[in-house]
Each structure stands twice: as C-alpha cells, then as structure tokens.
Image: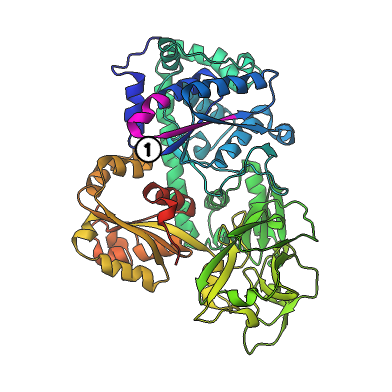
Amino acid sequence: MASTRKSSLTDHVAAHLAPHLPRRSHILIGLSGGIDSVVLLHLLHTLAPRFEWRLSALHVHHGISPNANDWAQFCADLCSRYGINLHVERVDIAPLRDEHGIEAAARKLRHAAFAAQDCDFVALAHHADDQAETLLLQLLRGAGVKGAAAMPVLSKVEGPVLSRVEGPVLSKIEGPFTKAGRPALLRPLLDITRAELEEHAQQHGLSWIEDESNADDSYPRNFLRHRVLPLLAERFPAYRETLSRSAGHFAEAAELQDELAQIDAQGAVAGGSLPIVVLRKLSAARSRNLLRYFLHAQGAPMPQAVQLEDMLSQLLGARGDASVCIEYGGWEVRRYQDRVYAQPQLGGFDREYSIVWKGENELFWPALGEKVCFWQVMGQGISLAKLRSGKVELRLRSGGESLRPRNGASTRSLKNLLQEQQVPPWQRERLPLLYCGDKLVCVLGVAIAADFQATDSEPGIVPGWASGLRQGGQTLLESRPQNFLISNHYLERSMAVERTLSIIKPDAVAKNVIGKIYSRFESNGLKIVASQMRHLSRTEAEGFYAVHKARPFFNDLVGFMISGPVMIQVLEGESAVQKNRDLMGATDPKKAEKGTIRADFADSIDANAVHGSDSAENAKIEIDYFFAPKNVHSR
C-alpha cells in the first residue's frame, strides 16, 4: 500500500518529535536490526544535525535465535557506517522463560536494559500496526483499562533495572550497570503504518535482517498479524485508526481511575505504605482500584484479577496484630502494623558482609539491593572530624549492639530501638550499621550515637538511601508521628530527601510575587537548589506538557505558558514532591485551601500560579528537561 502522506516521512517525524525532544538531547535507539528499527535509525540520523541530537544505539542480544550473533554484527556494521556508538547488551532469558514465556521474558529483559541506560530518551520503533496488535492481544487476555490503553508517544521506563549484583535483579548481563535515574521511552512512529516504513526503506535503499520467528504463527502476535488482521482489513480497512482511537479512550479511563485512587487515598500513602483502614472503608471495586494504584506506584507488576482479589482478602481478613506476606511475580506484599507494604523479594545475603567507606558519595548495599548515599551538610548528621579517628565501615547486625542515641539519654539496645521505631521486621537484619573503629556510630535511618553527632558549627555526614530510605517502594521507617531518637535535621536528610520541579507561571510572575512564593518554600523546609527565569518557546512548552497533547486544553495551556516569563526552580527537602503539592493547593484556586499558594495568588484554574511535579519519577524527568546536573547544587 503506497503512502498517502503529502510530506516525506522524515518531515512528518520531525514535526512529531519537535514538541517532545529538547535540542541537544541524547537519544538512544533500540536497534533490533529489523526493518522498523532500521528505518527509525535512518530517520533520526537524518534529523540529528537539525536538532543537535546526540545519538547512540542499543542492541539486546537475547541469545534465542541461532542467528543472534549475526544480528548483533549487522547492527554493529550499520551503526559504524552512520558513525553511531552501539552497545550490545547480552541477556539470559532462562530464569524468566518458564514463568513468562519467551516473548514476555524477552520483552521484560529489553525494558530492564532500557531502564539502565545513561541517556535522555530511548527511542523505540513501535508503529500503528503494533498499536492495533497490542490492543487486540490485551483484550483477548482480559486486560483492564490500563492494560488496554494506547502505547503513548512519551512514557517512563517501568519495572526492574538490569544489574550485575546478587539479589533482587532480573538477570545477569554483559555490560555496564549505569544510573538509578531512568530515561524516558519515546515512540515516534505510532501513527505510521508498517507499509509506510517498508516504502521508506525501499526508497532509501536500506537493508535489514528478518527474524525467522516473525513467521511462526504459534506466537499470538504473529497469529493475529498473519491470519486475523488481513481479514479485518478486508472488511474494516481503517481498523488501525479506530483501534488506536479506542486505545486512547481506555487511556483516558485509566487516568480517571488513578485520579479516583488519589482521592480515595486521602494523602494516606506515606513512606511507601498504605493504611489498612483506608482500604477497609471503600467499596470492593474502589478498594481494588486503590490497591492496584498503590502497587503500580511502588513499581510492582500488576497482579491478575484473581490474585488481586485474594490479596485484598488476606490483607483485610487478617487479625489486627497479624503479619501477612503475599508473594507474586518476584514481589512481596506485606501487612505490618495495619499498613500495607510492597517490595521486590529480597534474596539471601552474606551475614558477614562489610565494606569500608573511604569518602565515596555512594556505596552499594547488597542486603537490601540499594545504594547508600553520603551527603556532607553543615551542622547535621555525623561529625566528619570524629569519623577521621578510625576506619569507617558498614556492617550487618551480629546481635547485642547498643548505642546512646542522644545526649542525656541512656544507652539502648539496638533491638529495642528498631522495635520502637517500628522498622519492619524483614528489614532489621539487613540494615547497614556504620562503625568508626569498634564504635557503633549510626544505624541508617534510625539513630546516630550522641558522641558522634555533629555540632551546629562543624561539617557533618548524613548517610541515607539513594531512593530516600525506600526499598522496593517502602521506607525503612514508619512515617506516622512518633518521637524520633535523632535530630530533625538528620531525619530531613535521611528519611525521604527528594527533589521536585516547581514553575511559577506567567500570571504569578506578572503579579511580582516570586519572593513571597519562595518564602513559602523555604519556611516549609524546601531548599531552592537551582533556579532560572525563562520565557519559554512554543517548542519548549509543548515538549514539557507533551503528556497532555491529546487533551482538549493542550493548546490553551501552551499558549498561557508562553504568554510571559516563568520562574523555574528545583526544590529539595524531605518528601519534597508531596510537600510542594500541599503548598500549591488544589488545581482550581476556588477549591484550594486557605493559605495555599493557589488560594492566595491564583485567579483561575487556567491561570493557577504554579506547577509542581506529581511524582518523584516525573520530577527527575522534568528537572532534567530544564537543568543539567552540574547546575543543581544541594545546600
């Protein structure tokens, strides 16, 4: 079928990408060697000079086909001709094959490889035919609205990250483990058909490889592609467009479900846990929806309907003092102290493990599959001078440990401290203990020994988790009010230190209230660690709000954001994302609580003074959109 587009495919993709990709972005192309990804590579290579994009490519070597080595070599030769760096990631599907099947296992490993890449965007070659096939497959599997939603042009990478380390990892790989932050997934070909890609490849003399498995109708997708869709095309030639439209409706319904879950949660999802009482008071349908939302927010896979029903039954049916642990899909859902937690299953660990700290910014802690970070902060945490008196080492519990948590307090057993702080039992044996010589100095997230606490006038070291004391979505300390045994300064750094993006919009800038809004941030414990005033271009505004592109208010929103200068800042502090959203107030100023920024400074829902990131994951994407890492400084 010949293309009916009036513009070239290259110009069409350029127009499609311009709103989403800032200039000088680093785009990594998922390159299988098939026609779809070869055309995508050609298109982006052609457009890169125009937009100053930096390109690289990733080929995931599954080792399934006897031709897998030849495919990797083909991709290497192709990238060499284009002058593009290629990384080949070798994965082993054997651990996942029996549980998930070949296709799903390979897909999980690919996405885990994408999540580990150090780039701004991972570009994938999904097209209109893939979109239609995916929707039909999801419906045939009995998917809900989220599963049947359209593949978006721009999304975040979800799921595990490939890693070399032992523990809750998806697979061993040959290749580097990179960063904890994740790139965004970009699908620029979703409105382009397979036939149009084939036409482009022929016009430009492109070559590609053919995966022999694509002809095997025993795979459900191939069965649909070869036997079902040709019949649909005869009777419903526009099926791609109509199915894509339906997928869009499902996506909107999924958004509404999430908004309902946020209302039902009532701000009670704290520290990566959910109170049982919130689930108990909802109808069955709404409690299922909230639990699904909670699991998704922790990064857990979606359970099947029967699993979800059984999960709710166990969580709600257990006695008040009972501890429940439900295992599924490599994850654990637990009930403890009348709250629900979710985390990846943790493997065995070496109880004799220890590691010397030599001043690094971060160290990996295998027992929890997490990174420990060390911040230097004046007058907070552990006295840096006193740490220099001996070898500093992280160890595991061996039993019988004790420390004096504050001046004037008596020495306490670590066992009692952990119980009083309500550290979940499954975490207690895995916590790192920081020693200086033979003296216990700090139990991460629990207490600092009084003799080692920094004074107000000296530099201190604050250890904490890279994810803000979170492991698999749960914090190690309960976040409900309690009498902590360490200073509030330390908790601010170690409990849930986050960064979030804030934008003071044109209406508030015009009112000259930037200083007043900044005062709100700082008086509530949010530090401004980067800022800039800018007059956004249309391209910048459309790219930033690309997630709303299909919504009816998109053009008005973009027009408003480019109507005058804005003030953009990165805020840092404990639970910064939620704290900033609480300070902002409801989207509609008329519904915002008195004393919030929008209630005091905004005029309408369309000119509502401020923007704030809605999650830690989106905050990372939004901060990277406006600020280079070297321009963000903790203080």
- The one of 110 and 292 positioned closer to us in this rendering: 110
- The one of 320 and 490 positioned closer to us in this rendering: 490
Q: Amino acid at mark 1?
A: Leu
Q: In the rendered view, would you say 355 is above or below 243?
A: below
Residue 509 in the magenta stretch? The answer is no
Answer whether residue 339 is visible to the viewer in this image.
yes
Which secondary structure lies at badge 1?
loop
- The one of 132 and 350 positioned closer to us in this rendering: 350
- Residue 224 in the figure: left or right of residue 441: left
Quarter of the image where one finds residue 408: bottom right
Colouring style: rainbow
Measured as percent of width and height from the top left, residue 54 is found at 43, 35
Measured as percent of width and height from the top left, residue 148 is found at 50, 34
Tally the marks.
1
Q: Quarter holding the N terminus?
A: top left
Measured as percent of width and height from the top left, residue 291 is found at 57, 52
Magenta segment boundaries in residue numbering: 45-59
Name the residue that disc number 1 marks. Answer: 21
- Residue 14 in the figure: left or right of residue 132: left
Q: In the rendered view, would you say 499 is above or below 292?
A: below
Measured as percent of width and height from the top left, residue 471 is found at 62, 57
Q: Residue at x 55, y 43 (%)?
A: 158
